[in-house]
Image (spheres, coloured by chain):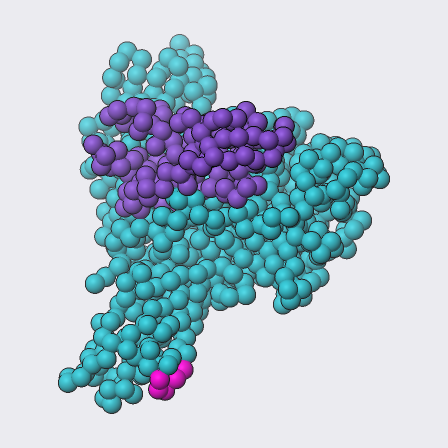
Amino acid sequence: MSVINKAIPSVDGKGLMLGRKGYTDDLAERNSLIVKVLRSPHPFAKIVNINYEKAQEVLGVELILTHKDFKRNSFTRAGQGYPEPSPHDKFVLDEYVRHIGDEVACVAARTEKQCIEALKLIDVEYELLEPVLDFEQAIDNTNLVHPEDGIYEMFPIGFEPKRNIAASYHMEVGNVEEDLKQSEVVLKQSFYTQAQAHAMLEPHTVNARLDYQDRLVLYSSTQTPIHVRRILSQTLEVPLSRIRVIKPRVGGGFGGKQALHGEMLVSAVTLRTGKPSKMIYTRQEVFESSCSRHPMRFDITLGSTKDGVLESIDCKVLSDTGAYGEHALTVFMVAGSKVLPLYNKVKSVRFYGDVVYTNHTSAGAFRGYGAIQGNFALESAIDMLCEKLQIDPIEFRDKNMMKEKETSPIFEIMGEGTEGTAMIMESCKLEYCLHRGKEISGWDDIYPYKQISPTKRRAVGMAIAMQGSGIPYIDMGSATIKLNDDGFYNLLIGATDIGQGSDTVLAQIAAESLGCTMEQMIVYSSDSDLTPFDTGAYASSTTYVSGNAVYKAGMKMRNMLLDEASNVLKVPKEQINFDGTTFESSNQSITLKELSNRLYYNEDQKQLTATSSYVGTKSPPPFMTGYVDLTVDTETGELEINNYTSIVDCGVPLNTMLARGQVEGGIVQGIGMAVYEEVIISDKGKMITNDFLSYLIPTRLEIKKLTTEFAISYEESGPYGAKSVGEIGIDTPPAAIANAIYNAVGVRITSLPITPEKILLALKRKDEENE
Amino acid sequence: MKVNFILNDHPETWEVDQNEYLLDTLRANDITSVRRGCDTTSCGVCTVLLDGNPVPSCSILTVSVEGKQILTVEGIKDSAERLSVHMGHHGADQCGYCNPSLALTVYAMKQEIKHPTEQDISEYLVGNLCRCTGYKGQEEAIKLYLEEDE
């Protein structure tokens, strides 16, 4: 009996539907002090003076903290492996505020009302500074976002704060400029991608208390409990051993909870008052004071032969990291490293540019992590080149794209903040995905478009994509499997379920490796005291990296069980068959239940526990093709997405339903980025879209139909053949939709989101040009 | 001040502030299935049924529920459990933060609309945002749940 490649319901689905306690705020101490932050109304200022005498007198106020209460230890909130590839450019509280919504001071009071009253009474004198609000004007601007001392890079990332540069990068294979001069056909185009907000439904939430051993215990809605513990320890100078971080159920993350947000201040309050405390971000704080996606500008040049052999790709990128450099370099690099290898047959490829500081809300990790930005630019440019060449875009891709058993030199050159790792595509069903998508999406009937009414055109468009599966040689996952009396197991994992279902998928891997049912494998995750090391839920790593650790632990436990059975049955273990329930030799048997009860109560008594860990030696990419079928109204510019077809190669989908949920959730977020969502910041630096009334995520009315299929694929290095599936879904919609709009009405939209206004404006310009 | 109401079929009398919102009152009294998501009545995760109608508890003053019936997911356990079985089989279980509110709204829709079409379902549930699933798995599960009762 197998539990792999099945539609297994989530282990927590029923309990969460019934409203059982599980999320961070459900687990706060009932008498917790409420912690709230006074936030900057200015995009850039130096704090001259803070007077909080009146605030301190408000009944119930227990503590007020300002930058003067913290030692100047710069750190990064990014929540990445150590040493971090993000600059240490943030202080818990600082004398500078660098965006509207940045932290000025914090108040802890017995009730929320007291807190809010006290915040109003804090008198701050600011010296206003000229902000940098246009990311294309940031480099060498006379106004410096980070003029202060004490900030640094942990290893060379191109950090030049005196030029407003958080990170920079350059790579080249071959000689792009020389090759482009020789190319028969050259296409040059710039593209812009916008900031997108994660909009997870549970706001950032954290609470703390001191336990009966006087240790600091945090519950945090985080994707990275182990990084949270380390960064708290380093920054607040509390020994790591005195901190426990528990990640309970998390109400969505998508990268937005990889970084630390309230953890520092809540910990500081509890350590100083000795009292439990809690913080829940308001939705406005989630928008203005957590992070969003890095906006980018791409300047792309493609060179090809007349008959459609892609020869060169040149990609210059400028990225806006906002006030702090979280994930500045790594998101930037992924915009190349998880996009450019798609076209692996080129003679030359160059990828370079800078990540700049501005006085915008900080950018950070977000599902897709640069790949969605790069994919929009490159996959739009490829269709433009095809138009120029008069070659079918599917035929062009088929000829030029990555195939199974091939490689790209980029894998070895570009990692995440460091050099990469060479690898061959042992599993790559992109070719199948390409043809299957064409077959079932209605492409042949519709391409390029069909006039369905005097003002409406139905069209199709497509894009191909890849992602990765963890960060090789850096991020580690571990698992412990513990046998209990009566023959059931505990699976203890550091891996972080943030709603994507990793507890379920990892329990499936463990159950499969031991031949037991899901009911016999009790999973517990993400508690820094009790579960083994795992870097957390990011970089599409959990199924592949943590999953491999679980598989290894399962095999180790199986071996330990066979040793014990061999001892009882008095035959070599090679002669024993174990089906998950019973150990059988040629003439006798013992059940797992009997064996475990014997081990714990009667003879050869011992606890059986198997622990394994895994670090990837490569990052096998999942691949997909996205085909959109949409209708454009040429009178109103409005779009209707009729169907989005995804054909995905994620290796073996271990849980077919959860994998579908990952793909479709990603597609809808990608559609959001393509046509609805935009974090808008005014020319005064104020975020205009700071609630769900002004920032529109897709509702169920916008999503008519999603068609999702998986290619038959098996990744030899993955647990039971799996690669990752968490991010790949988000990558294709912006380019596929832009390509479909071009196919529909012949206008090329090069900046996201693609709004009706942009379509109408482009149509008007096209008409004017034709006149 | 005191407020009297029926919570999940049990009469309750609670001491509340005049300007307290129902969401805060419920959570302070350990009904944590009702959740905060947005502060602007746009996301749906704070939904309760007030005399059978789905309402955002983040914008209802607790004193205004005097004499009314409030249902949270704890009061529709069987119905929620049946919905959860279908959700589990359609990949609609992800973070779960919005699930109790979804179960309540679906329950209310079932009382209000007989044989809802796909469009009816999408329209009725439009205020229940979900950022995880892409909605389609949820809607397949909801259809099966509704059919089960017919």
Q: Position of residue A745 (x, y in %)?
A: 34, 20
Quadrant in which the N terminus of chain A appears? bottom left
Residue situated in front as seen by the camera: A104 or A60? A60
Q: Which residues are magenta?
A: A602-606
In the rendered structure, the colour chosen for chain A is cyan
From the viewer's perspective, is A625 left or right of A162?
left
Farthest residue in the top direction?
A771
Kindly tell me whether residue A588 is visible in this rendering.
Answer: yes
Q: Position of residue A128 (x, y in %)?
A: 78, 32
Q: Is residue A755 left or right of residue A1?
A: right
Q: Is residue A330 above or below residue A186?
A: below
Name the residue: 36% across, 42% down: B77
- B116 relative to A391, above or below: above
Identify which residue is drawn at 71% across, 56% down.
Answer: A274
Q: Residue furthest bottom?
A: A570
> Chain B is which colour?
purple
- Which quadrant of the rendered structure holds the C terminus of chain A? top left
Q: Is residue A733 magenta?
A: no
Residue nearest the viewer, comparing A373 with A717: A717
